[in-house]
Amino acid sequence: MNKIICVLALILASTAINAQQVSRNDLPPAVLRSYLSQNSKGALDSVWSKNIVTIYKVNYIDEGMRYEAQYFEDGRWIKTFTEIPQTDLLKGITNQIIDLYPGHRIKRVTIELNNDGKFYSVDLIKGNDKITLYFLTSGQMVK
């Protein structure tokens, strides 16, 4: 019986440590929009929390290229990426960025591999405005 109580106490302590209560006003707008679109009443008495998740990162060099891979604590792979020179970005992607985001400059370009596929990830900046765009390796914008 004492073992069961200890295990339950550890589970509750772990949950308390890994979750932080969040005010509805502090929610990212996209989260609130999604919630309201799925719950038409948008209950005002809802209690929001934010989980704190441990992510392990490893940086390594393979065939002269620097990579970073990320994993959840349980060993599940999240993504692997490598930074590339802006000059290695497809011309079609560069043209789309110039057309859609005038005045922004490319700060960083990476090739990212994750469970959804392989992408170019492009960080843009214009003053305090920071945007990350994702493109398929064919050049099509996906986000």
Image (cartoon, rainbow, N blue to C red):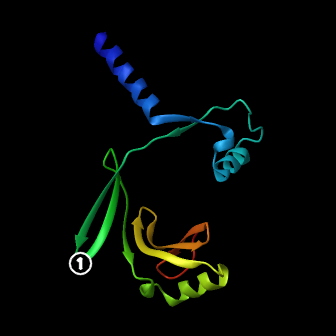
Q: Position of residue 68 (x, y in %)?
A: 33, 64
Which residue is at a point 67% across and 32% down the rendered structure image?
46
> Would residue 89 appear left or right of 75 to someone viewing this image?
right
Q: Position of residue 28 (x, y in %)?
A: 63, 50
Q: Quadrant of residue 109?
A: bottom left
Which residue is at a point 66% across and 82% down the rendered structure image?
102
Q: Quadrant of the N terminus?
A: top left
> Would residue 118 appear left or right of 33 to someone viewing this image?
left
- Viewer-proximal residue among 115 and 71: 71
Q: Position of residue 40 (x, y in %)?
A: 77, 42
Q: Is the residue 128 above or below the residue 87 in the image?
A: above
- Viewer-proximal residue among 46 and 124: 124
Q: Position of residue 11 (x, y in %)?
A: 39, 26
Which residue is at a point 41% across and 63% down the rendered structure image?
114
Neighbor class of circle 1 (other Cα within 10 Å; few <14, some 14-19, many 20+) is few
- Viewer-proximal residue among 26 and 30: 26
Q: Quadrant of the C terminus?
A: bottom right
Q: In the structure shown, which secondary structural element does the residue marked by tag 1 occupy?
A: loop
Which residue type does callout 1 highlight? Gly
Residue position for label 1? 64
